Image (cartoon, rainbow, N blue to C red):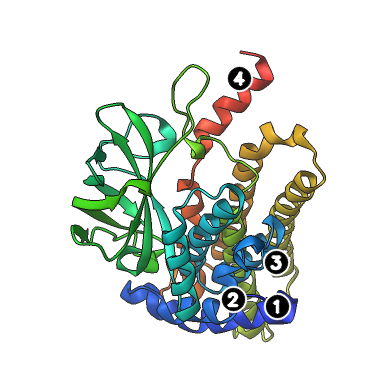
Amino acid sequence: MSGLDLSPDALAKVTAEIAATAGEYDRTGDLPWAGIEVAHRAGLLTATVGTQYGGPGAGPRDTARILTAIGEGDASVGLLAANSLNTHAAQAAFGTWPAHYYEDLLRRSQDGPALVNAIRAEPELGAPARGGIPKTTAVRTDDGWVLNGRKAYATGGTGLAYHVVWAVEPETQRVGHLIVPGDLPGITWIETWDHLGLRASNTHDVVYSDVRLPADAFREIPRQPDGSYRDPAAAAGPGSFGHPALYIGVARAARTAFAAFARERIPAALGKPIAQTERIQSVAGEIDLQIVQAETLLHGALLRLEAGDTTILPELSAIKVAIGRSVIAATQTAVAALGNPGLSRHHSLERHLRDALCIRVHPPQEDAVLIASGRRVLGV
């Protein structure tokens, strides 16, 4: 897992290789294994494995660079990579996985891509960041746990080597996560994913029926001083900028696609490429401005965190929202300027717009962020 090459040339090569198959996977909805394999061969899927486990121990800024490069190639691959990188980073920081399970995950990661994701949303409850206790249960037995429940929006589908499942112990009402190997009996996938964007991410529903796990598989989420649980995704934290980073990659891909079209498009009435007109040059400048703004927000925030500036912590959720607005503005500007070609399935801009819009669903979501920020400003 060592010898990670994060040079601009190496990352650009990864982007190009992943992008070569992105359109086809978007059309079929199949798991984008070709792109996942590219990221795996480059060592990017395990970049955040801690040095204590023999990994590179990539930090938040390098992780952001990785995910921007992957997302520029294929947003679905970027989402799958982000979830795995977040899991490894959390393990490096907190070490909550049972040793035998994490050792197995690392072994699998040497042989090929070993994807992992936190499986949290539920059909009845919705997004955990909105509050509530999971309906999925982890019942204690003499020798371990029995897991039952149905989850929604479980990105990765059958491609996941491990699930980190949010559940409640009914007897004590303890809430936590169960580490679940993806190949255990009792796990059934229901193909519900037919989404606007990220179509190859396989974010299906999954049902757990009497899935048996060892005693050390459950890890409780720490309680608040008042005894309640606060969902970790309710507010952006120092490790929560992987998702915004991949969508910056989507905006960069839209910028590239717009520029290529503008250089090649020569209307008969104009007699020259539209790239030579001031209108299109102004549009390209606006797209670039939005991307520069998003990248500066992302890396500026991470640099402040690296420097130990804790005053930025209450602002992180708002920064995530601002990045999302810039990403969407960049892609929408590109599509709007080109008209019908930008909305055609024959042009990649249409896919980039659909993928960019998905940044809104990642917690914390904009309305909750604005209310929390407003209350902080007003002292309410």
- Mark 3 burial class by Cα count in 10 Å: few <14, some 14-19, many 20+: many
Classify mark 4: helix, strand or loop.
helix
Q: Which residue position holds label 2?
A: 43
Question: Are the two marked residues, 1 and 3, in contact with CB atoms closer than 8 angstroms?
Answer: no
For marks 1 and 3, the one nearer the N-term is 1
**Residue 350: x %, y % from top left:** 47, 68
For marks 2 and 3, the one nearer the N-term is 2
For marks 4 and 2, the one nearer the N-term is 2
How far apart marks 1 and 3 lie (CA) works out to 31 Å
Q: Give me the disc on residue 284.
A: 3
Q: Which residue position holds label 4?
A: 375
Instruction: Say which quadrant the C terminus sits in.
Output: top right
Q: Which residue: 49% across, 61% down? A: 84
How far apart marks 2 and 3 lie (CA) works out to 34 Å
Classify mark 2: helix, strand or loop.
loop
**Residue 50: x %, y % from top left:** 62, 61
What amino acid is at disc 2? Gly
Q: Which residue: 74% across, 36% down? A: 312
Instruction: Say which quadrant the N terminus sits in.
Output: bottom right
